[in-house]
Each structure stands twice: as structure tokens, then as C-alpha cells.
Amino acid sequence: MDSNSKWPDIERREHKDTWVKVLQWLSLIGWLLFTVALVVSFYAAPERSYGITRYKGIEVRDYWATPLTDYLYALLWLTAIFSLASIVLSQFRTRRATDNKYYNFVLLFVICAAWVLYIAFNAYW
């Protein structure tokens, strides 16, 4: 028992709270959407022009594929919304120092926000 605490360090919760399970599912769905966005971005992004392709005269696409970029943009926004909702929910549900901090939600949100800005500047504007 901590000398500054009047409560013993005993876990009194018998099972996981429903909201903790919801946070776990939101995390799983968010990262799965992010993985799908990675695959879509592979096909939507412009192709690179290497020396061998220029030498052989092979044409490469130097622009973002519009339909796929729209799907990618929507996927990233959806992932950012999932992670932001998870951040807000975790702020209300985690009160103890031993509770999970859910840093993966913040990481996922920052990555998605940066990627949305990158695509907005490079593919749309």
C-alpha cells in the first residue's frame, strides 16, 4: 500500500467494463481501416519514374488516381474519426493511474491527420 494513498493497491474490478471492450474494438477497427488505407494508397499514389523505365520508354502515371484517392481520403477521415472518438471516450473512462493510456489512438490520429493534409495538398490542390 502506498503511504500517500488511503486505498490499498488491490484491483477491485471483477471484469472488464463494457466501455473498455468498446475501446478495444474501436482500436482494432481503426487500425484495420488504416491498413486498408495503406493498401489503397499504394495503388492511388503516382508511380515513380526510375532510370530503367525512362531508358525503356515505359510510361508511368505521375498523378494521383482520382477514384482511389477519394476512397483513400474517406478511409483516412473515417479512421481519424474513430481514433478521435476513442481518445475522447478513453479520457472519460480511464481514471486510475494503472489504466491503459491508449497512446495508439493518439498516434493513429496524428498519422491520419498528417496523411489527410499531405493528400489534400498533393492530390487535390
Image (tube, rainbow, N blue to C red):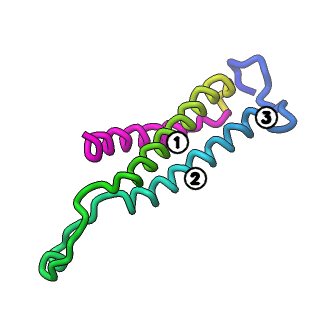
The magenta segment: 99-125
Tag 2: residue type? Leu
Q: Is residue 88 left or right of residue 110?
A: right
Residue 75 percent across, percent down from the top left: 49, 46
- On the image, the x and y values in percent for residue 112 come to 43, 42
Residue 23 within the segment the image draws in magenta: no
Point out the residue furthest to the left here: 55
Q: Amino acid at mark 3?
A: Thr
Report the residue marked by disc 3: 18
Q: Say which of 60 and 30 sits in front.
A: 60
SS majority, magenta: helix
Q: Is residue 18 above or below residue 38?
A: above
Q: CA distance from mark 1 to mark 3?
A: 22 Å
Q: Secondary structure at mark 3?
A: helix
Provide the residue designation for mark 1.
79
Number of dots carrying numbers: 3
Mark 1 lies on a secondary structure that is helix
Foreground residue, 62 or 10? 62
The residue at which mark 2 appears reads as 32
Residue 54 vertical placement versus 73 (above, below): below
Q: Tell me if label 2 and label 3 are in contact, CB under 8 Å.
A: no
Query: Residue at point 31% right, 43% down?
Result: 118
